[in-house]
Image: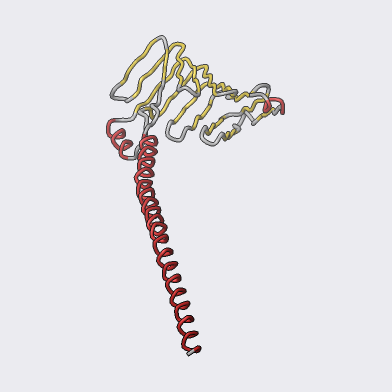
Amino acid sequence: MKNQICLKTICKKINGLNFFIILLLCFSFLTSGPILTSSVCAAARNKKTIVNKKPLKNKKKLKTVKKIKKEKPVLFHVTSDTMISERKAGFVEFSGHAAANDGNSVIKADSIKVFLYTPQEQKKRKREKKQGTIKKIVASGNVRYTTGNKKAFSDKAVYTTDNEIIVLTGKAPIVKMGTSFVTGKKITLFKKDSRVIVESGKTRRVEALFNSEDRIKK
């Protein structure tokens, strides 16, 4: 009998513990529900932000493409006492204290001839995406060319626009920068890469003087 009473009390205690464990499991399940839902919401929000960022990047790219397409026009200003236009020959001649300015350099001479591209050549240049209508400039008589701190003097100067090369010829063409100078029979100036070639003649040799102080001056 005593043993039976002991077994009943032990069973009651076990049942009580099981009930308590079940309550704890139910409570933990209920509290974990909102945590799971909040994490799902956070993930959904992150997805929204990622989707919204993509079109913004595309808009920025479109803006940069528009900026690249804008190009500055090429300006060329000439002054003189008289002007003669030869349409068939394809050039315009300015004479009498003539001066031509492209914004970066100035050519002054007694006469300046500006040779233009023909209509056929201009169509070809448009297909090649090239700008400008001036093909060549020929200055003659007391030619003075200035660009930055450099000055050149000659009897004749021929400037081709596509390759940006100036050829100085005459009795004694000379290029000066401060007290430094170089002279010869023929001087070729390459504007694109700042290069100079001086050639001698039968009666005239190449002569140059370089002063280190002239390089420091701007």
- Residue nearest the viewer, comparing 195 with 25: 25
Nearer-the-camera pick, 54 or 86: 54
Residue 191 percent location from the top left of the image: 52, 32
Could you tell me residue 92's position as x and y percent?
Answer: 36, 20
Q: Is residue 183 left or right of residue 1?
A: right
Task: Decide if residue 124 is on the left or right side of residue 174.
Answer: left
Residue 163 horizontal/vertical position (percent): 45, 35
- Residue lying at 56% horizontally and 30% vertically, measured from the top left: 187
| Quarter of the image where one finds residue 19 | bottom left
Task: Please tell me whether residue 154 is drawn above or below residue 202 in the rendered image.
Answer: above
* Relative to 33, residue 204 above or below: above
Task: Residue at the far right: name it.
Answer: 212
Q: Position of residue 29 (x, y in %)?
A: 40, 64
Q: For residue 174, which quarter of the picture?
A: top right
Q: Residue at x 40, y 59 (%)?
A: 36
Q: Nearer the viewer, residue 114 or 64?
A: 64
Task: Residue at 38%, 46% (x, y): give it.
Answer: 53
Q: Is residue 122 above or below residue 39?
A: above
Does residue 99 show up?
yes
Seen at 38% across and 48% down, the residue is 49
Task: Name the quadrant of the C terminus.
Answer: top right
